[in-house]
Image (cartoon, helix red, strand yellow):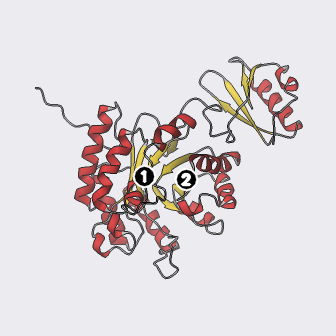
Amino acid sequence: MLIVMDAHATAEQIARVCDEIRQMGYQPHPMPGPTRTAIGVTGNEGAIVQTSRISSLPGVIDIVRITKPYKLVSREFKEADTIVRVGDLPIGGPGVVVMAGPCTVESRDQLFASARAVLAHGATVIRGGAYKPRSSPYSFQGLGEAGLRLLAELRQELGVPVVTEVLDTETLPLVEEYADILQIGARNMQNYSLLRAVGRSHRPVLLKRGFAATLQDLLLAAEYILVEGNRQVILCERGVRSFDQHSRFMLDLGAIPVLKALTHLPVIVDPSHAAGQADRVIPMARAAVAAGADGLIVEVHPDPAFAVCDGEQALVPHRFAEMMQQIERIAAALGRPVLGRSPQPTHPA
């Protein structure tokens, strides 16, 4: 349920409505807007029947029932796009953001070489895994805290935010200390204790779609985070399992406009994990921007042949530069800038 307050409702009137919702046994979620405040209500298992207790309060002008099973992430709850801010960087809105870097942090030299290469061509967030959930227990699992310290050193020296994956509630406080964005990987999309924990974090969360998750599954996973109070959630389409073997995963490009219609949260795309092969990453990146994605997260490695994880899908720096040039042209055709890219000079005909 969504309670719409009058444009001139006072702070005291809004507080009184919130108190009444709590007395009814529910949780209020006030959301100030450009013209008026709306208050979402969660905690009800069915329809709230005692709406007259709220509608009669001063300042209330309307009560809207939200029909979706996910409430706080729904466009019914919030019509305007959410802009997730990482420092001065807005994710969502008119600009397209590119996060890039190696799949995993292997060494200082490898991390800094990758970061400098992608920053030179317009990336605005550096990605790098310190903890790696692998299908095999014998595969490289990441450098752990040593990798986090390298990411923090990079952030300090190059002045750029970093995103890295958090695997469990035990290591969450450590990752929070070092990272700017907490990534929830596909394997953990329905790890509800972890979702609730990052929902109580002050860090933005990048939530990846699970291998076999429906869009409703993804949005309900995001709801777990928002209901705990963290509204800074970025959704990521990274491909789902298919019956065909021509690619690692099937990138669901159709999910982008559907998600943009269903939710106010920003949506980015990971073409690297979906494609599984470097030569397919750029076409998928182009298609994602054309479909309306708010950004990309791409794997880049200075020497993929010697990468300890997913080298076959990592772009080398000069191919990343080509990708950035191409998506910039596509974004421009849609009236969107690629944040971090210098405006290209225009030449008279």
Q: Position of residue 144 (x, y in %)?
A: 51, 73
**Label total for image:** 2
Image quadrant where one finds the C terminus: top left
Q: Is residue 267 above or below residue 314?
A: above
Image quadrant where one finds the N terminus: top right
| Label 1 secondary element | loop
In this orientation, does residue 91 appear? no
Q: Which residue is drawn at the image coordinates 46% and 60% (left, top)? A: 243
Q: Quadrant of residue 33?
A: top right
Taking the image as shown, residue 247 lies to the left or right of residue 259, namely left
Mark 1 surroundings: few (<14), some (14-19) or many (≥20) residues within 10 A: many
- Outermost residue toward the front? 243
Taking the image as shown, residue 163 lies to the left or right of residue 299, namely right
Q: Quadrant of residue 3?
A: top right
Label 1–label 2 contact, CB within 8 A: no
Nearer-N-terminus badge (1/2): 2
- Outermost residue toward the left? 349
Q: Which residue is drawn at the image coordinates 71% and 24% (left, top)? A: 4
Taking the image as shown, residue 141 lies to the left or right of residue 4, namely left
Q: Which residue is drawn at the image coordinates 79% and 26% (left, top)? A: 12
Q: Which residue is mark 2?
A: 207
Q: Position of residue 166 (x, y in %)?
A: 56, 63
Q: Position of residue 9 (x, y in %)?
A: 73, 20
Instruction: Point out which mark residue 226 bears.
Output: none
Q: 100 or 111: which is nearer to us?
A: 100
| Label 2 secondary element | strand
Residue type at mark 1 is Leu
Q: Which residue is mark 1?
A: 251
Residue type at mark 2 is Leu
